[in-house]
Structures are given as structure tokens and as C-alpha cells.
Image (cartoon, helix red, strand yellow):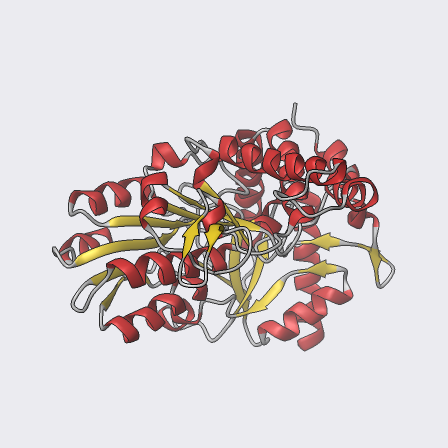
């Protein structure tokens, strides 16, 4: 059963008061809060098991190695990967995408090739490809975003040519909350022989995602958006593709043997994990996966859909407020960007903070999308498993106060 009262008790930060008022945290698209079990996992590792992994044969090293690799196994199962060899630990989804750009892109793309992105991408799925495009003289195409926040799939189909080697798209927009039809897009990409990368930073935390069902070639995820610590994430990639890619970084542990004139690489996935990894946070990410699975991703998705529907109806009644992107939950989940007439988004966020309501303001690392939709910047409220309809009521009350202050 989905018990929101019980869930909220698992998150100690929700007991905080800001300006003497109970915290309402609605900045989950930026990062999520951590349940006590994840916090305890970090403390437990450093208190009882701290050691370097993979090389030591003493008790602590063997315990730490087993815990680290168990976390990898949990993640592989969580997203439906065939093997732990397909899970590479990185710092975040940004590093995961850069790994693909630097290793796969520089090895297999050549002058005249093309990559398809969309106008709704986070900067982390634009900038690495811009750098690569300039270096390799390849072309970048962008699928337009329509006024309703959905991608223009008719245009997408028109720009496919034999030169397209990669399609790299966000699964859920971190600005509009739009759920893009990545399964359909991936099928179209594979029909022309292109590989398919999914930026799943916003989707894996809040809905069931199975990489074999999606048939994506790459999937990038940040742990801190799914109840895990910062500084840990993972790249999923099909084993045969990872095997064909050269290492991203050189150093310890990513090698099998080293000589003065050459080196031989380690097996997957360690070939892409140079140096001492972020052991404690990887283990804690595994604990976060345990927590999410205990609740159930379908339950989390349904809860967030209900919150989003409630928020759209409540915010939609405010005459001074404009909502961007989908106005229904049919193809949308818990991210709502909006503007308040006559008040700068930063001022809105500051005034809401006085009411202990935390939202985000600015471009949300998606300046091209804001430019396309002619939005100078926006306010963004984003929900997660521990949020309630009462949180949204507090948001509306805070917005009403902000408007009265400026009037």
C-alpha cells in the first residue's frame, strides 16, 4: 500500500522549518531529498567497511568490494539490463553523456555524419555534442518542440538520412514535464541504423523504465534525482557497444596489464571506471534503489500523476499565472514550469522561500527551450514521492501572497 504519511516520516529533512514554517520541498527535478535508510547506508559504510575495492584481499576490502558490486547488480535489475557489465558508474548523467560523446563519438563518427537531438534537451545533452560536432565536422539536427510541449515527430521523420548515426533525446523534459515517446523514436532510429541514447535523469526516478523494452543503446541516469547521494550516477550501454568503445579515462583499475609501451584494458564495466570510485555513494545508491522498489515504481508514477493533475487544476485557476507545456497529465508528469505576470521568477522564488516553499527559478539548464517558447526564464515546481496535495495548496497560498506584495 502507498502510505504517504509513513513515507514522509522516512525523510528527516521534511521535519525542518524555514522562517518558522514547515518546509515544502518542490525542487525535486533539481535533486531529491534522501530517506534515512540512504543516510544510514553512508554512515554504515564509513563506520564499519571503509576500504578501497577490487584489489585488496583483507576483510574490509572484500566487504567493500562486495557491497559496491551488489549495488551495481541492484541497478542492473532495476532497469532490466542483461548484465552488470552494462552498468558503468559515473558521477551523474552529464558525465554519462560525455563518456558516450568522447569514447563512442570520437571513435565511430566522421565528417558528414549527423546526430539528432531536440529543442527540449538539457544542456548536458547539447553541449557535449556541440563540442564533438565542431571537432569532427558532423551535423546536429534538432527536433522542434510544439506549443503544447510535444516533439514534432513529423519533422523528426523528415530529417532522417543515412548520415544520421545517433539520436539522443531526453525521456522527460526537466522544464515541461513532457514524457517523450522514446520507444517509438528508438524504433525509427534503429530502422536507419542509428544508435539511440536516452537521457533518463528525470524518468528513471519516477516511472518504470526497462532498457530492453526501450531497446535503447545508451541510458544516462543521475543518482541524486532518485533519492541517492550526489556525485554518483550510471551509464547503461549494450555490452557489445561498450566492448567496441575505447576507455574514457586512463589510470588504475581500468587496466588488465600495463607495460612501458602499451596497456591492456580491464573487462567490462571496469574498463570505464578509472581510479578509486565513489564507493560509499554507489552503495547508498543501491540502498535508494531498494527503497524505490519497496514502494514500487508504478505506485510512485501514479502518485506523481495525481499530484500533477491536482496542481494543474489548482494553478490553472490563477488568473495571474501562465503554465508552459502540456496542460493535462496524459503525456506529462510532475514538473510544471510557469510564470507570474509582472513578477520576475527569481522574485517569486524568494517570496515563496519566505513561506518555506522551495521551487526553482531560471532557465533550468535549458536555455534553447526557453528561447523557443519565448520564455525569458520561468518558475518550476517539481514533485516526488513524498509530496502531498497540501504542499501544492501551500504553493498556491504563497503565490497569492507574492502577488499581493507586488500589487
In the image, 353 versus 192, the foreground residue is: 192
Residue 371 visible in the displayed image: yes
Q: What is the x, y in percent for residue 121?
A: 39, 61
Q: What is the x, y in percent for residue 207?
A: 50, 38
From this viewpoint, which residue is outermost toward the right? 20
Q: What is the x, y in percent for residue 258?
A: 47, 55
Residue 388 visible in the displayed image: no
Query: In what quadrant of the picture does the N terminus appear?
Result: top right
Q: Which residue corresponds to the image point at 48% horizontal and 60% vertical from the top-left?
A: 250
Q: Which residue corresponds to the image point at 56% horizontal and 40% vertical from the top-left?
A: 304
Q: What is the x, y in percent for residue 384?
A: 61, 45
Query: Which image quarter: residue 303?
Result: top right
Query: In what quadrant of the picture does the C terminus appear?
Result: bottom right
Q: Which residue corresponds to the image point at 27% horizontal and 44% vertical from the top-left?
A: 186
From this viewpoint, which residue is outermost toward the left? 162
Q: Which residue corresponds to the image point at 71% horizontal and 74% vertical from the top-left?
A: 405
In the image, 19 versus 105, the foreground residue is: 105
Query: Which image quarter: residue 300?
Result: top right
Amino acid at each position: 500500500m502507498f502510505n504517504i504519511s509513513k513515507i514522509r516520516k522516512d525523510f528527516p529533512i521534511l521535519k525542518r522549518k524555514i522562517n518558522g514554517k514547515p518546509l515544502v520541498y518542490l525542487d525535486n527535478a533539481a535533486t531529491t531529498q534522501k530517506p534515512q535508510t540512504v543516510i544510514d547506508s553512508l554512515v554504515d559504510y564509513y563506520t564499519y567497511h571503509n576500504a578501497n575495492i577490487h584489489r585488496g584481499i583483507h576483510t574490509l576490502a572484500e566487504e567493500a568490494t562486495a557491497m559496491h558490486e551488489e549495488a551495481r547488480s541492484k541497478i542492473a535489475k532495476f532497469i532490466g539490463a542483461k548484465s552488470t557489465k552494462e552498468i558503468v558508474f559515473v558521477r551523474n548523467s552529464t558525465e554519462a553523456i560525455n563518456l558516450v560523446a568522447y569514447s563512442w563519438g570520437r571513435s565511430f563518427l566522421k565528417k558528414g555524419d549527423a546526430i539528432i537531438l531536440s529543442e527540449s534537451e538539457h544542456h548536458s545533452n547539447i553541449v557535449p555534442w556541440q563540442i564533438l560536432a565542431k571537432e569532427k565536422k558532423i551535423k546536429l539536427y534538432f527536433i522542434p518542440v510544439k506549443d503544447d510541449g510535444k516533439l514534432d515527430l513529423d519533422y523528426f521523420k523528415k530529417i532522417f538520412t543515412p548520415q544520421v548515426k545517433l539520436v539522443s533525446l531526453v525521456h522527460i523534459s526537466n522544464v515541461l514535464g513532457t514524457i517523450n515517446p522514446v520507444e517509438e523514436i528508438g524504433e525509427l532510429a534503429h530502422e536507419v541504423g542509428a544508435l539511440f541514447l536516452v537521457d533518463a535523469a528525470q524518468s528513471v526516478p519516477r516511472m518504470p523504465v526497462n532498457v530492453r523494452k526501450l531497446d535503447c543503446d545508451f541510458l544516462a541516469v543521475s543518482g541524486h534525482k532518485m533519492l541517492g547521494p550526489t556525485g554518483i550516477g550510471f551509464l547503461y550501454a549494450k555490452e557489445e557497444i561498450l566492448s567496441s568503445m575505447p576507455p574514457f579515462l586512463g589510470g588504475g583499475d581500468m587496466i588488465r596489464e600495463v607495460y612501458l609501451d602499451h596497456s591492456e584494458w580491464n573487462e567490462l564495466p571496469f574498463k570505464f571506471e578509472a581510479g578509486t570510485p565513489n564507493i560509499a555513494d554507489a552503495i547508498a545508491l543501491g540502498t535508494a534503489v531498494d527503497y524505490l522498489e519497496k514502494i514500487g515504481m508504478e505506485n510512485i508514477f501514479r502518485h506523481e500523476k495525481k499530484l500533477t493533475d491536482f496542481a494543474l487544476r489548482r494553478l490553472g485557476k490563477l488568473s495571474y499565472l501562465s503554465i508552459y507545456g502540456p496542460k493535462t497529465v496524459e503525456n506529462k508528469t510532475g514538473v510544471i514550469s510557469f510564470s507570474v505576470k509582472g513578477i520576475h521568477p527569481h522574485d517569486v522564488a524568494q517570496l515563496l522561500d519566505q513561506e518555506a516553499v522551495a521551487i526553482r527559478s531560471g532557465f533550468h539548464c535549458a536555455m534553447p527551450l526557453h528561447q523557443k517558447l519565448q520564455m525569458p526564464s520561468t518558475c518550476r515546481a517539481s514533485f516526488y514521492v513524498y509530496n502531498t496535495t497540501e504542499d501544492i495548496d501551500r504553493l498556491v497560498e504563497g503565490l497569492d501572497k507574492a502577488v499581493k506584495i507586488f500589487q
